[in-house]
Image (cartoon, helix red, strand yellow):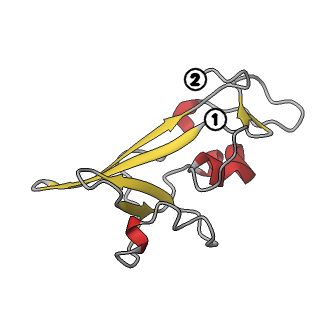
Amino acid sequence: MVWKGLFILKASYDGRISFKPSELLLPETTEIIQFRFGADDEKDKNFLANRPLMLLRADVKGMPNNYAYFTLPLTPHALNVFGNNLSALTGIADASEVKSRLSAEYEVDNMGEYLNVRLRLHSQTGNEM
């Protein structure tokens, strides 16, 4: 559920949306789009901060201070749950009241390209689920 950016697992009430954590991320087999920007932009951790884009910023494995950008791997239900807190969830905006985070690491090797996504959820009391 979401209420002022805090997520809890209880029945719906007061406009909160109930959810199961397993219903928030798209399946691993889902193909998502990678966006390419200029080389300088892909080294700027704050590149998305002043742009009207809502993308997932992934650390590039083995390349410190390099980032790759992808569409959000969230289900429609997750978009309803997180609502106006998506920029805080993805780390684009600094919002100390939203502790939950969606993060990713992008890896390229001889076998292919991989996006490892992690969704850390915190309850209304601040405990990680």
Determine the residue located farthest toward the right in the rendered image. 14
Mark positioned earlier in the residue sequence (1 or 2): 1
In the image, is residue 88 above or below residue 127?
A: below
Residue 23, picture quadrant: top right
SS for dot 2: loop
User: At x 73% / y 26%, what residue is drawn?
Assistant: 124
Determine the residue located farthest toward the bottom in the rendered image. 38
Cα–Cα gap, marks 1 and 2 = 9 Å
| Residue 111 in the image, given as x and y percentages of width and height | 12, 53
User: At x 60% / y 36%, what residue is drawn?
Assistant: 100
Residue 25 visible to the viewer: no
Rendered-image quadrant of the N terminus: top right
Q: Does 59 sit left or right of 23 as displayed?
A: left
Around disc 1, counting alpha carbons within 10 Å, would you say few (fewer than 14), some (14 to 19), or many (20 or more)? many
In the image, is residue 51 above or below residue 46?
A: below
| Residue 123 in the image, given as x and y percentages of width and height | 67, 25
Front one among 79 and 121: 121
Q: Are marks 1 and 2 in contact (CB under 8 Å)?
A: yes
Around disc 2, counting alpha carbons within 10 Å, would you say few (fewer than 14), some (14 to 19), or many (20 or more)? few
Front one among 45 and 79: 45
In the image, is residue 8 above or below residue 29?
A: above
Residue 6, picture quadrant: top right
Q: Of the residues shown, which amino acid type is indicated by label 1?
A: Lys
Q: Of the residues shown, which amino acid type is indicated by label 2?
A: Glu
SS for dot 1: loop
Report which residue position mark 1 lands on. Answer: 99
| Residue 49 in the image, given as x and y percentages of width and height | 60, 64
Report which residue position mark 2 lands on. Answer: 128
Q: Does 28 sit left or right of 114 as displayed?
A: right
